[in-house]
Amino acid sequence: MPWLSGLNSPQTEAVLTTEGPVLMLAGAGTGKTAALTARMAHLIATRKAWPSQILCVTFTNKAAREMRDRVGGHIGPAVEGMPWLGTFHAIAAKMLRRHAELVGLQSNYTIIDTDDQLRVLKQLIVADGLDEKRWPAKQLAGLIDRWKNRGLNPADLGADENEAFANGRGEQFYRLYQQRLKALNACDFGDLLLHMLNILRREQDVLDDYRQRFKYIMVDEYQDTNVVQYLWLRLLTQAKGPAGHNICVVGDDDQSIYSWRGAEVANILRFERDFPGAKVIRLEQNYRSTPQILAAASQLIDANSERLGKTLWTDIAEGEKVRVIGVWDGPEEARRIGEEAEALIRAGISLNHAAILVRAQFQTREFEDRFIQIGLDYKIIGGFRFYERAEIRDALAYLRVIAQPSDDLAFERIYNTPKRGLGQKTLEKLHRHARAEGVPLFAAAMQVVDSDELPARARNTLLALVRDFARWRDGAASLSPAELARTVLDESGYTDALQNERSAQSAGRLENLSELARAMEEYETLGAFLEHVSLVMDNDRAESGNPITIMTIHAAKGLEFDHVFLPGWEEGVFPSQRALDEGGLRSLEEERRLAYVAITRARSSCTILHAANRRIYGQWTSAIPSRFVGELPDAMIDAETSMTGGESLWRANWSEQSDPFAHLAKVQPSRVTTRGPGWQRGTAAQFDAAPKRIVEAGRSAASFAAKPRKDIGVG
Ligand code: ATP
Ligand code: MG
């Protein structure tokens, strides 16, 4: 059985325990996904099931592809017939095609994207006469998504949910939206799962059919399943008889990082209750990371109270300690990572195996600017390059029209963004006028507002816009580019419109816009900045074929890289300001899990950076290193600072700051550390007062080396 070769004994047990419920609960890098893959190969190769009788759920399409490839490596072309290997959404879509008529759709239904979804919702809101500004479509879309994630149909909404939109009209709009989609023979992403759940609940014969079909069910990253997914699995597996309970889920409660999208870590915690007699398999050997990286991550996550706790160890040879680098500011952070990347290249290491993992999308901008400047190839996964994002392009379009009134493309982009009631008809008139007079659109607008070519309302709106631009153009002479950008975004109503959305994405977009203004602070004139942007946006950059990856930590789940850089470990960036504002233990612990996921992506080196200063709203603000830095074990980190004055300067800074770790004293008395991050040792007296366990946890790397089994002993 070649698919078993190389697996350790608990992994092998997980593969061979094919009957009954199995929970593989284990920390990062312990080979959960590897075992799940081997299990699938085993089931097929030993003819326990045909490929079509296995339902295997992965978190991303990429993970599904990789799994298919790996299983194919074991069993050959038989892997082709595996229709039920994919994400929940992909699998649900496939099922729904077969049963669409049961929920009033035809089998050729379309799956609409977010843009279409918003358009439909907006039509409903406007048709009702509601004020779209007060009750934005985005907000309704967010609510409906959340309800669908929780498996709730319109009739299932409680009073609170109903109250959440337009003063008690949540249910009504949800219902209208579903009717409208049906009329369009369409469904949204959330519907894929909800429709199928409804079908499985209502149609016993369909449910029986799938229960018969799926002899084995497997789920990777189970800790991030949401309610509707959980209900699905419950229905499919709660049958009597041989096919009933063969469910194997794998996950890690410490890596639950999608609660903001409705994931419920409780699903994994109650697995044994849901499936009595479940075999729980714990994997403790980590095959991914050096002992230093593993110890650092384990100690960090140990500060969380809501966790099961687990032991992890590794046989991998000693490596470098986790580096914690303090730099002066954001640009230096980008410079430093650029230098580190160049050093890797000089050492003959391909940057394919290196990644920069950020907490929030806006952080990528500084790296992109720097890498373009030094000609370092990079790729951004799961997001647009900074200057290609919609909100950034909008903002740039305003600035381009200010700098260059004949920039028609830019004018067209923003003349009705945010929505100000200037429609397609007005634009057509402007175009006609511009062509006739041989002038740019903006000049045409100036002329048209003086004539009676347009109806009064459009004329007034356009006039206001033309006047705004005149004022901003004047402003450009006296304001710095960054101030100008902020003024324009405020006065144009762009910021307000985003704020009113209150959608999951709008907060990130606002952050991106502040980041844009921050970037502009380095430029004397608007022209100089815009020139920089066009150079950055130039797509002719040489591709080396070995780009360094930049992505969010969320998107990096399940992946691994030889070298990982983790920038921006400062209070307010990571943990995020939002988590701090919410203030609850819950959101803070989710941030810490995210930090754990980040560190455990690294195989041989992990470098954490934090800057002493960030420029926020035009002000230099001194940033406090993330509490997570302070929670890393001394013995596993190498701290350095590029600041002149080094430690003493830092200590001086530190004493002026309020103690960022003070909150821990309130939350978890036993876990207080008196240590500042890395080099910021507390006073001797403080240090003596530190709980003993921390000193113990910080065993030296040498003591690990002395033992054949490097027990990191956490939990
Ligand atoms: P995560 O929690 O991050 O998803 P995981 O538990 O799914 O991690 P895998 O990605 O399956 O871990 O494995 C981590 C690494 O260890 C991979 O490079 C994998 O090939 C390797 N690996 C897994 N099992 C073994 C084994 N028994 N022997 C050697 N290497 C292994
Ligand atoms: Mg995995």
Image (cartoon, rainbow, N blue to C red):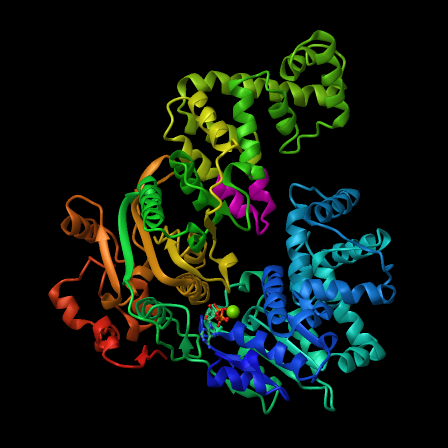
Q: Is residue 511 magenta?
A: yes
List x then y, in percent, for residue 290.
34, 68
Task: Name the chief secondary structure element in magenta.
Answer: helix
Q: Quadrant of residue 155?
A: bottom right
Q: Is residue 182 left or right of residue 630?
A: right
Q: Is residue 441 left or right of residue 602?
A: right
Q: Quadrant of residue 709?
A: bottom left
Q: Is residue 186 above or below residue 155?
A: above
List x then y, in percent, for residue 29.
45, 70
Question: Residue at point 76% right, 64% down?
Answer: 94
Query: Of 41 and 261, which appears nearest the observer?
Result: 41
Question: Residue at point 22% right, 66% down?
Answer: 674
Residue 454 seen from this side: yes
Residue 700 seen from this side: no
List x then y, in percent, for residue 444.
67, 13
Could you tell me which quadrant the C terminus lies in? Answer: bottom left
